[in-house]
Image: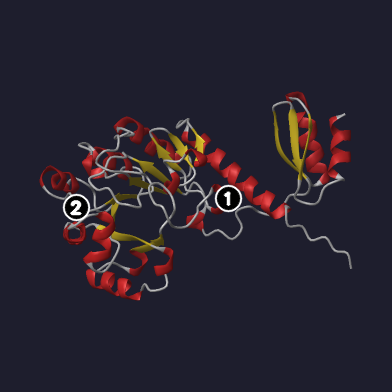
Amino acid sequence: MVILDLVQRIGEVADGATVTVRAGPQDEAAVAAWCARTGNELVEVAGGTATVRRGRGPDPFAGLSPGQLPGTRLWMYTNFDCNLACDYCCARSSPQSRRRALGADRVRRLADEAVAAGVRELILTGGEPFLLPDIDELVSSCTAVLPTTLLTNGMLFRGRRLAALRRMDPERLALQISLDSPDPGPHDQHRGSGSWQKAVHGIRLAQAEGFRVRVAATLPPEQMHTLEPFHTFLDELGIARGDQVIRPLARRGVAETGLELTVETLIPEVTVTAEGVYWHPVSADHDDQLVTRELFPLRAAIEQTLHRFAEDRRRAAAAAQWFPCA
């Protein structure tokens, strides 16, 4: 009966569309064999149903560069508290925010599982990671297994925190420091008086310590067409063009304006916080982009993200079918 239902239903839909029929686990082998024989795709058998796609559908990952493939990079929010209260922070971080730290044990396990899951780069962010007393231990767990990038505002490199920085491996770790303008005014307006000068000092100090430094800027969308003066300033700071990350403001967190970013409009970058696994780091404090509350096993969370992304792209493709009438 399952196969008869599939034959009837598949004939009623366009290529790339899916149909769902009643089926149990005992029917999975028969449905899989029928799909293989007829050139259709078994999506899943679960919850008393079987879902089948007519044809194989387009490759959901076509057009993505290797670095854009979901699961290539793993983001970890080490904490959410911060020494700054930027007025557009997507993570709603500030000195008043709860720490909500992942902790050394979970970071170590995530780093170890990331290798087997096919991750190629680890990215640690916050909050401000240098507020953590064990940040050098967290970084060491990551650089021991994969190239790692640590996001920071670059303002805390002194005393014990400078000592922690010096215990990190510059051969395996890049620092990404936030700087929003080539002059203090716009940067300090959003991040606090004097923060620009401290960030520039942090960039120069990190370079002097032998670290590769990326600079990340967040700008209003309407300013994204006037970037050359900023690039020139960063060139003069010794930041390679490939390490100059200038992105538009997103309307997330405490930002009241900016780009509207949803699951449907974002290529996922698997992001782990103490509360769960999220679609993208820009939305890691928003439940609408929560993938799962289960951090482990990491491979399962990555596969769940990949499956959801693939299905979203296939549905979008199926919704735009060519239907000739002449």
Closest to the observer, 234 or 184: 184
Give the residue type at disc 2: Met
Residue 171, percent from left and from top: 26, 53
Q: Which numbered circle lies on residue 78?
A: none
In the image, what residue occupies the spot 31% across and 75% down? 229
- Eyeballing the image, is 48 above or below 285? above
Q: Quick one: quadrant of the N terminus?
A: top right
Q: Residues within 10 Å of mark 1 (few under 14, many from 20)?
A: few
In the image, what residue occupies the spot 51% across and 48% down? 268
SS label for mark 2: loop
Residue 47, percent from left and from top: 69, 27
Q: Is residue 178 visible?
A: no
Q: Which numbered circle lies on residue 155?
A: 2
In the image, what residue occupies the spot 43% across and 64% down? 221
Q: Which numbered circle lies on residue 264?
A: 1
Q: Report how far apart the C-alphas of labels 2 and 1 lie in the structure.
A: 35 Å
SS label for mark 1: helix
